[in-house]
Amino acid sequence: MSRIQLLPIGKADLSSLGLLGAALTAEIGIPCEVMAGGLDPEPSLHPERRQYCSIDILSRMQEQLAPNPGRLLGVTPLDLYIPILTFVFGEAQLDGSCAVVSTHRLRQEFYGLPPDQELLQGRLVKESIHELGHTFGLTHSDNYCCAMAASHTVELIDLKSSSLCTDCRARSRAALSRSSMEAS
Ligand SMILES: [Zn+2]
Ligand SMILES: [Zn+2]
């Protein structure tokens, strides 16, 4: 795969997107670039919930895909939901091209705690690797230290690392070599 494009959605912090891109490249070895434009979140707002529907965001991202897209990762400070859940940290198309992550509930302030930029950035990297992993066809890992472990709370995110376990790493390598063969 050629590249991962980071797409700001809403008022995403561009300097933190640059750091995220560097961390993702270091972790998965694929170049990242921050896209100049962004995606308008407002059509995906649920007026009563005051949250943004990640399913709707993913389908609108899909419409923006370049012909040979690699992966498109949306990053937003807004709170995301899917209809059956109170919230989601992120969502991805399994074995697809698009994923989205939210920093809203990764911030210590959300839990009434003092801000911690470093912790926030670390959580964002883990969640981004997790959602991108789904786009490589990876499902959830039983290894609680693996970035592909399911995490429904920030405590569980803090327990895991930003790396894939040996099994997930092997499966993502296989998926990546498949997609580079398809592209060539
Ligand atoms: Zn997941
Ligand atoms: Zn794993």
Image (spheres, rainbow, N blue to C red):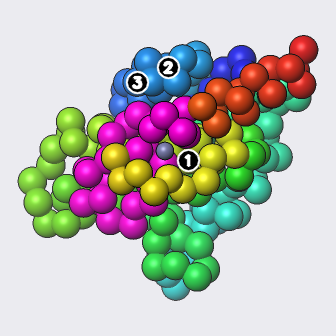
Given residues 144 and 103, the one toward you in this image is 144
Q: Is residue 113 left or right of residue 49?
A: left
Q: What residue did someone put label 1 on?
A: 131
Q: Residue at x 36, y 31 (%)?
A: 16
- The amino acid type, in three-letter code, at marker 2 is Thr
Q: Which mark is residue 23?
A: 3
Does the magenta run of residues contain 149? Answer: yes
Q: Which residues, given as a range, are shown in magenta?
A: 146-169
Q: How crowded is the residue under tag 3: few (<14 C-alpha within 10 Å), some, or many (20+)? A: some
Q: Position of residue 158 (x, y in %)?
A: 25, 50
- The amino acid type, in three-letter code, at marker 3 is Ala
Mark 1 and mark 3 residues within 8 Å of each other at the beta carbon: no
**Position of 23 relative to 110 (above/below):** above
Q: CA distance from mark 2 to mark 1?
A: 15 Å
Q: Is residue 115 left or right of residue 166?
A: left
Q: CA distance from mark 2 to mark 3?
A: 5 Å
Given residues 151 and 59, the one toward you in this image is 151
- The amino acid type, in three-letter code, at marker 1 is Glu
Q: Position of residue 156 (x, y in %)?
A: 30, 59
SS state under label 3: helix
Given residues 154 and 104, the one toward you in this image is 154
Q: Is residue 40 left or right of residue 106?
A: right
Q: CA distance from mark 1 to mark 3?
A: 15 Å
- Which mark is first along the chain, 1 or 2? 2
Q: Is residue 4 visible?
A: yes
Q: What residue did someone put label 2 on?
A: 25
Q: Residue at x 60, y 31 (%)?
A: 170
